[in-house]
Image: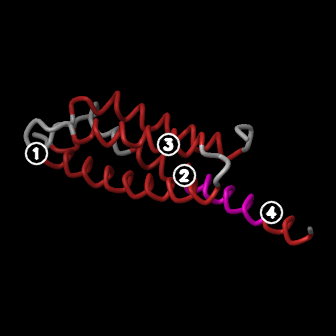
Amino acid sequence: MLQRIQTIWILLSILSAVFLFITGQDAKMFGDLPIIDALSIILVLIGALSLFGYKNRNRQILLNKVSIIINALLIGLLIYWLQILPGGIDFPEKGIEPIFPAIAIVTLLIANIYLKKDERLVKSVDRIR
């Protein structure tokens, strides 16, 4: 069911990955490898699988946990990138990129809370039958 509250939280995490893809176009590390762009696309795909896999809540929780791990990795990579920039974090136009994975982590944690709550509700109803 797409009208559940956790769907909104998962959608917000997908939007966060899209915004990271848009703002992280200039983040090049390890040569010219577009690591941030690739991880952002992977996060969007995992989020879409989680969003439309609403019939299997356990898989949704697992995909959200994988997304949380990737977002934590992204935060570390982006902070490293900000540190190796000439001038560091002192540029006011730089430094917004780590905010998007942090927002995604929070929204995915909230989505997992609601998913676990739904799973407990379904198990309690199955016990009554």
Q: Which residue is mark 4?
A: 121
Circle 2 or circle 3, nearest the eye = 3
Q: Residue at x 60, y 40 (%)?
A: 52
Where does label 2 land, which residue?
108
- The amino acid on which the numbered mark 3 sits, given as a three-letter code, is Gly
Separation of disc 3 and disc 4 at Cα? 24 Å
Give the prevailing secondary structure in the magenta stretch: helix
Location of residue 123 with respect to 72 vertically, above or below: below
Q: CA distance from mark 3 to mark 1?
A: 26 Å
Quarter holding the N terminus?
Answer: top right
**Sequence order check: which comes first, mark 3 or mark 4?**
3
Q: CA distance from mark 2 to mark 1?
A: 29 Å
Q: Nearer the viewer, residue 63 or 111?
A: 63
Mark 1 crowdedness (10 Å alpha carbons): few <14, some 14-19, many ≥20 = few
Residue 30, labelled with which disc? 1
Give the x, y percent position of residue 29: 14, 42
Q: Which segment did they paint magenta?
A: 109-122
Residue at numbered disc 3: 47
User: Do callouts 1 and 4 mark residues in contact (Cβ within 8 Å)?
Assistant: no
As helix, strand or loop, the secondary structure at mark 3 comes to helix
Residue, x 33% and y 51% (percent of image)? 75
Q: Amino acid at mark 4?
A: Leu
Q: Nearer the viewer, residue 74 or 54?
A: 54
* Residue 41 at x, y percent in the picture: 36, 36
Q: Work out whether mark 2 precedes mark 3 in sequence or the reverse, and give the earlier one.
A: 3
Within 10 Å of disc 3 (Cα), the crowding (few <14, some 14-19, many 20+) is many
- Disc number for residue 85: none
Three-letter amino acid code at the position of disc 1: Phe
